[in-house]
Amino acid sequence: MSSSASAEKKAPAAIPDGTTDYKPLRSGPAYDPAKVHIADTPMTWSNWHKHVNWLNTTLIIIIPMIGFISAYWVPLQLYTAIFAVIYYFNTGLGITAGYHRLWAHSSYKASTPLKIYLAFVGAGAVEGSIRWWSRDHRAHHRYTDTDKDPYSVRKGLLYSHLGWMVFKQNPKRTGRTDITDLNEDPVVVWQHKNYLKSVIFTALVFPTVFCGLLWNDWLGGFVYGGILRIWFVQQATFCVNSLAHWLGDQPFDDRNSPRDHVITALVTLGEGYHNFHHEFPSDYRNAIEWWQYDPTKWAICLWKFLGLATDLKQFRSNEIEKGRVQQLQKKLDQKRAVLDWGTPLEQLPVISWDDFVADSKNGKALVAIAGVIHDVTNFIKEHPGGKALISSAIGKDATAIFNGGVYLHSNAAHNLLSTMRVGVLRGGCEVEIWKRAQFENKDVSYVNDSTGQRIIRAGNQVTKVVQPVASADAA
């Protein structure tokens, strides 16, 4: 094989961006990048068990199954149910307000006591360490919907919800991100190095002991306050990766999958306004309207009031509204592109007045309005003003008639008329001058949308002629 052929197969050199490969802090089997990763091999009946990430599968599938089965024999006490709901919201906030908005996006600053609390309850959600979770989430934002997105919804809704954790992933395939700040945070580093101990204590031991010591419900605390609460909070926050990229509207940008929907917000403690979040990730809010459900935002505001949180970041409302308007304009352009605005003037043939009159006498119902010739043959019977009025204008210049001489036609009438264009009159109107300027590449004022379609605004149709204002001199 020639050296040139070998060079073609080499991957292009990555542009230096200041990031480095992810380096684990905990001891474990050394990763050999030269060895083919199991995720890059086909799954078969003989090797499927090698593809499964058994630690994650145990934590998010097997243990919850044990909890559901145990619930058949373990009665649910009222106090335990209340505790489970309260602890559910606290561990959920550990993910949404802690892992996500504080550590992954640095959308506000937290005092050390608040960091310790969020690291504690975040571990109780059993979704990985802060360092691991935030690193993957930053990669998700940087490489949304691409192969480097660790939980891309393009690989399937179920994959983005659960599959990416159940099956082993090649770490080389996940996009690189900068986690220097996380490596310098002692709370993050301690929790990462002691993650399994933290999970066992916060997720299972703490709820069991709490319910056992206070009202003697040891088993209920373990099953309902521990195992089943874990499952519910996991499924809720996993919806940020799946449901929030599948259900809802895209008011700020539709180039990627994130979407806004109240149902997702209700399920995920306010993380459902995901289209906004992906556009403005460093904003501590997901919901920017007062009536939108975002308990995570409210909790952060409360912590600020208590002096536990500072430097709450918000994008300027001017930039937010610009994004909203641009997306609205894009949707309008897409809608405009499928409508019939008539043959563009520059594509119409130039017809002399004599030919126009002759064709009108030879069976064609042609009407000239503002220098544009229209064929109204198929519209005569449908004309709301009757056949006589429109028939009287055939073969004539009906500009004055159409624009108030007989009736001041509506905007809809001008739009409908544009679909009947068949030509432009020679030598008697500014339309031909405009068209000639097009051929001669002279400057002509008009506006195109993002798809290249000319924008025709109400009242600006070429057939719309403004009537002169009467004055005392004219009288």
Image: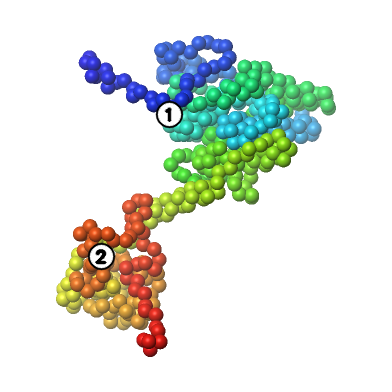
Quadrant where the C terminus is found in the figure: bottom left
Rendered view: 141 above or below 50: below
Assess disc 2: are there few (<14), some (14-19) or many (≥20) residues with their C-alpha within 10 Å of its C-alpha.
Answer: some
- Residue at the disc numbered 1: 147
Q: Amino acid at mark 1?
A: Asp
Please tell me in which quadrant of the rendered image residue 408 appears: bottom left
> The residue tagged with tag 1: helix, strand or loop?
loop
Query: Can you give x and y, in whole percent of width and height, for residue 30 in the image?
Result: 50, 11
Report the side of 11 relative to 358 (left or right): right
Report the side of 351 relative to 335 (left or right): left
Quadrant where the N terminus is found in the figure: top left
Query: Can you give x and y, in whole percent of width and height, for residue 268 in the image?
Result: 61, 37
* CA gap, disc 2 and disc 1: 51 Å
Q: Amino acid at mark 2?
A: Trp
Q: Residue at x 63, y 38 (%)?
A: 311
Its colouring scheme is rainbow
> The residue tagged with tag 2: helix, strand or loop?
helix
Mark before the other along the chain sequence, 2 or 1: 1
Between 450 and 254, the one lying in front of the other is 450
Query: Can you give x and y, in whole percent of width and height, for residue 14 in the image?
Result: 38, 24
- Residue at the disc numbered 2: 434
Please tell me in which quadrant of the rendered image residue 179 appears: top right
Assess disc 1: are there few (<14), some (14-19) or many (≥20) residues with their C-alpha within 10 Å of its C-alpha.
Answer: some
The answer to whether residue 389 shows anywhere in this view is yes
Q: Residue at x 53, y 50 (%)?
A: 318
The answer to whether residue 100 shows anywhere in this view is no
Q: Residue at x 45, y 39 (%)?
A: 256
Q: Residue at x 39, y 52 (%)?
A: 334
Report the side of 468 relative to 371 (left or right): right
Query: Can you give x and y, in whole percent of width and height, for residue 266 in the image?
Result: 63, 42
Rendered view: 464 above or below 2: below
